[in-house]
Image: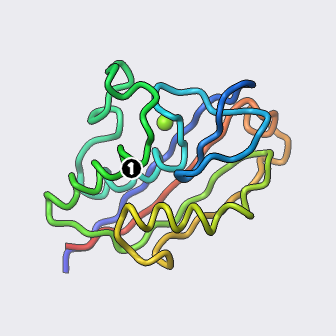
């Protein structure tokens, strides 16, 4: 069996007056993420992990942040396009493990819903999607609520 690993990282700035989308759902928050799309940092990291595992470049290569057709786009649509790209190369998702760094609000209550949304798009069991949340201990830009960051690792099989 052909097994490939991949990983992805993404960062978005946080500002007042923006919605906060993480893992395909909107989270109630004073601060929201800034981006060309809906700025869903977790889905973007997962897209890069999947693309990397299939050696298909990165999310910016496929969905340019200069392209008006992606302005404000729901990142779940981007993830479904990525699933098609890796499927075209004969890969299916084994499992994904992610970490989101956000100082506030707490994400743990929302993780079961994120797992359901993401596993639905990837057509895998929710058990194949692990999402972890941590703070940055009030240190640096993440700890000072200036930005949000996500890491994702994945296994693909052929
Ligand atoms: Mg991004």
Question: Could you tell me which residue is drawn at 52 percent across and 41 percent down?
Answer: 10
Residue 71 vs residue 57: left or right? right
In the figure, 140 relative to 130: above or below? above
- Would you say the beta carbon of the disc 1 residue lies within 8 angstroms of ligand 1? no
Report x, y in % for residue 49. Answer: 39, 54
Residue 78 vs residue 99: left or right? left
Total marks in image: 1
What coloring was used for the rendering?
rainbow
Quadrant (top left, top right, bottom left, bottom right) of the N terminus: bottom left
Q: Which residue is mark 1?
A: 47
Occupied quadrant, residue 110: bottom right
Report x, y in % for residue 92. Answer: 26, 69
Report x, y in % for residue 32. Answer: 68, 33
Question: Could you tell me which residue is drawn at 74 percent across and 64 percent down?
Answer: 109
In the figure, 118 relative to 95: above or below? above
In the figure, 66 relative to 126: above or below? above
In the figure, 84 relative to 132: above or below? above
Bin the neighbour count of mark 1 within 10 Å (Cα to Cα): few under 14, some 14-19, many 20 and up: many
Q: Residue at the right extreme?
A: 138
Question: Could you tell me which residue is drawn at 47 percent across and 25 percent down?
Answer: 36
Q: Nearer the viewer, residue 121 or 140?
A: 121
Report x, y in % for residue 144. Answer: 81, 33
Quadrant (top left, top right, bottom left, bottom right) of the C terminus: bottom left
Q: Nearer the viewer, residue 20 or 86?
A: 20
Question: Could you tell me which residue is drawn at 34 percent across and 19 percent down?
Answer: 68
Residue 1 vs residue 23: left or right? left
Residue at disc 1, secondary structure = helix
């Amino acid at each position: 069996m052909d097994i490939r690993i991949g990983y992805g990282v993404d960062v978005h700035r946080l500002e007042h007056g923006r919605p906060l989308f993480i893992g395909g759902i909107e989270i109630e928050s004073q601060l929201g993420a800034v981006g060309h799309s809906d700025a869903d940092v977790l889905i973007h990291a997962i897209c890069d992990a999947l693309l990397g595992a299939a050696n298909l470049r990165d999310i910016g290569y496929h969905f340019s942040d200069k392209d008006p057709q992606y302005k404000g786009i729901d990142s779940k649509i981007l993830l479904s396009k990525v699933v098609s790209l890796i499927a075209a190369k004969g890969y299916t998702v084994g499992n994904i493990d992610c970490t989101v760094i956000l100082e506030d609000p707490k994400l743990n209550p929302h993780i079961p819903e994120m797992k359901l949304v993401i596993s639905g798009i990837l057509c895998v069991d929710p058990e194949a999607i692990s999402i972890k949340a941590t703070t940055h201990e009030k240190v640096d830009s993440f700890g000072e609520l200036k930005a949000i960051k996500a890491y994702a690792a994945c296994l693909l099989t052929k």
